[in-house]
Amino acid sequence: MSLPHAILTALLEKPSSGLELTRRFDRSIGYFWSATHQQIYRELGRLEREAHIRALPAEQPARGQKKVYEVLPAGRAELTRWTAESQDPKPLRDALLLRLRAAAVVGTAGIESDLRRHLTLHQRQLAEYEEIQRRDFQPGKDTPQDRLHHLILRAGIDLETFWTQWLTRALQELEELPAQ
Amino acid sequence: MSLPHAILTALLEKPSSGLELTRRFDRSIGYFWSATHQQIYRELGRLEREAHIRALPAEQPARGQKKVYEVLPAGRAELTRWTAESQDPKPLRDALLLRLRAAAVVGTAGIESDLRRHLTLHQRQLAEYEEIQRRDFQPGKDTPQDRLHHLILRAGIDLETFWTQWLTRALQELEELPAQ
DNA sequence: AGGCTTTGTGCAACTAGTTGCATAAACGGG
DNA sequence: CCCGTTTATGCAACTAGTTGCACAAAGCCT
């Protein structure tokens, strides 16, 4: 139930077309709420129907024609409401931990290479986040917005740090285990 | 695509009925792959149809009658295959980070109390994990199974530690922010 | 014996996300 | 001017997870 709110947030930051949104999701909001262009278009349709957003007037709004959306007051109100609403954290769901648990029963053969691959991916993601931090969060920039964005980025950095450390340890443990 | 494998793992650890599985999910596997009893029954049905598991012979298998399942060789083979298979980590999806990003646009009013609530919940979960660690992982127990289970538990502990630290910092930052 | 709660199983409808494909305009090169 | 690529929009079918409810047996209390 969060995709519409992710879109409202993105559109408030800057009115955009479906494709522009898709690209921006790939770079920023998508780091913690990813979406495909199909999802985004479907949701834009819904939000427009509910009068939370509207397409900016264009000359010839035809198929294959860029359509830029902006948020209406009702949309902003809904986002404000949702943001302040109390929501339960949803339980962790991680296939890798599950696989390790399965490996404890059927044997660890073959899982090591995938752990190594995951480690590389998380290291890469961590490097990307740190690059963003270096580039976008110089000591000078310090508006409330910057501080919040930095806080969110820090969550990403810390999570990726956790995974790289944990995976390193996991690989070490696997090595010490008697071969099965 | 992991629930059937979670169930196979649980059944290999110990043959069980649907309700027993549900309870065990609440205490162990469910910490990283939760499921409701409805999901579990549906999946048990599927797994039985595909001959990955079978119900242990009972006198009168009627509705409202306990049905204990065990894993068949084909089921174990499938679990072994899945465990060793290469799988991409799925991108982070976290509503709280999204809400904070929204708050950067529409204002942080009202979000603080929920952050505090989340902090309490994560602290509680952390305490629960640490209790399990104390109880189930004494220095003596050191079979390969124990080591893998401990490794998984440590992931849970480290994740909850991350969240408590990050939320503490987030609350601190919010306080320092000019009221909106 | 009659009703009340617990144990156990399960269906049906709904919601959210994913995958695969279709379509059209615009643009750039030969 | 045709033709392939890029930009842009979108539908349809599928998969997975959630929510709400139903129903039967068994035990337990009075």
Image (spheres, coloured by chain):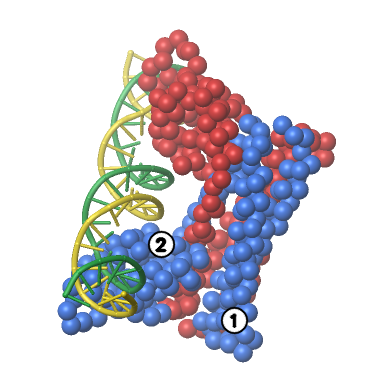
Chain colours: A blue, B red, C yellow, D green
Disc 1 marks a residue whose amino acid type is: Arg
Are the residues flagged by discs 2 and 1 in contact, CB closer than 8 Å?
A: no
Q: Are labels 2 and 1 on one chain?
A: yes
Disc 2 packing (10 Å; few <14; some 14–19; many ≥20): some
> SS for tag 2?
loop
- Residue placed under numbered mark 2 in the picture: A35
Looking at the image, residue B137 sits to the left or right of residue C5; the answer is right
Q: Residue furthest bottom?
A: A140
- Residue A49 shows which numbered tag? none
Whether residue A72 is visible here, answered yes or no, is no
Looking at the image, residue B36 sits to the left or right of residue B177; the answer is left
How many numbered marks, from 0 up? Answer: 2
Disc 1 packing (10 Å; few <14; some 14–19; many ≥20): few
From what the image shows, is residue A95 above or below residue A162?
above
Task: Return the x and y of residue B71 as percentages of the image width and height.
Answer: 53, 24
Disc 2 marks a residue whose amino acid type is: Ala
The C terminus of chain A is located in which quarter? top right
Task: Return the x and y of residue B165 as percentages of the image width and height.
Answer: 66, 65
Q: Residue at x 45, y 62 (%)?
A: A34
Q: Quadrant of residue A12?
A: bottom left
Task: Return the x and y of residue B157 as percentages of the image width and height.
Answer: 67, 52
Task: Return the x and y of residue A37 as percentages of the image width and height.
Answer: 35, 64
